Image (cartoon, helix red, strand yellow):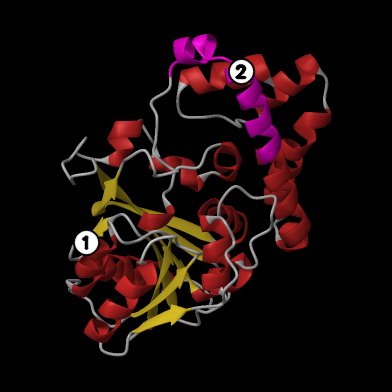
Amino acid sequence: MPTCDILLASYNAAKYGPALLDSLLSQTYQEFQLIVRDDGSTDNSLDLLRQYQPKFGGRMRIVQDGHPTGSAQGNFSLLLQESDADFVLFSDIDDVWLPTKTEHFIDLMQRHQSGLSPDTPLYAFTDVVPVDASLQPVSEGYWKFKQIDPEISQHLNRSLICCPILGCASGINRALAKLTTPVPAEVTGHDWWALLIASALGKVVYSAERTLLYRLHQANVSTPKRVSLTEYARAENRFEKVRRGMLRRSEQAQALLDAFGPAMTADKRRIVEGFVGLRREGFLRRRYNLLRGQYLYPDMARNLAVLIAS
């Protein structure tokens, strides 16, 4: 039976933590270790975590180092260094896992791992149910709600510009966990970074199963917003934000190239180099190569915004 670690990045967990922890205790697959690291909470999060620890029967470990990172990315980067399991699942403190989530991921990753060498990185992700702060569904699925095409994950060029996954609905194998940490400062998230590594060097798989209730609220930094070209045109400094976003993506791609370029196939390396090279090109050439390289979002609004702002 494969080993599984659930990595929980905790910050101010007192309000929503009990619902998440109760949902982990209710998983149909219980052969996991829960590794929790609190990132300097200002509430009684640590008391809550210690209260729940005995309920997991020795399968919950609280990491305390007294050095807040100030970000979920930094927290997960340190958590990854604490894990040595065959498979790793990520958890946010404000979600609620559906009972079969762990079982579904173990089955999904085992099936695809069986055809890979032990050193091949594997990334798996699923859909989720977006809910409000009271856990009432906002839409039947996140992909539909945000008009996300999960097939983007099968193409490195598309994944460089658009992140089609949520870390809380993702799992990785041991090979990918070893490559993911430490997470470079240039990247925009541990989950996107892991996805890009798997896309460049291994395999990305997905399932349409909705495996958790994904809570949308003001304090959730990854709360999605629908986009339209009208919104871009009206919002102050919107196109400047698009430019900055493209620069961050370029820096992230450069970090991928620096870390793993020699290990990539020639075709994959050419895709990443082409994306990184866009920022050095002139006005017309840059837009031509954006389209030629298919470095595109799934919707027209964002693609037009990128073409206007880049």
Residue 32 position in % (x across, y down): 32, 80
Amino acid type, callout 2: Asn
Give the labeled residue for mark 1: 19
- SS category of the residue bearing label 1: helix
Q: In the picture, which quadrant includes the N terminus?
A: bottom left
Q: Nearer the viewer, residue 89 or 201?
A: 89
Relative side of 45 to 260, left or right: left
Q: Nearer the viewer, residue 56 or 264?
A: 56
Q: For mark 2, does the 10 Å Cα neighbourhood hold few (<14), some (14 to 19), or many (20 or more) residues?
A: few
> Which residue does the image show at 46% across and 29% down from the upper left?
298
The answer to whether residue 200 of the structure is visible from this angle is yes
Relative side of 6 to 136, left or right: right
Pick whichever of labels 2 and 1 is earlier in the sequence. 1
Q: In the picture, which quadrant includes the C terminus?
A: top right
Give the labeled residue for mark 2: 237
Tell me the CA gap for discs 2 and 1.
38 Å
Residue 169 position in % (x across, y down): 36, 56
Relative side of 210 to 111, left or right: left
Relative side of 267 to 112, left or right: right
Q: Which residues are magenta?
A: 228-248
Type of secondary structure dominating the magenta stretch: helix
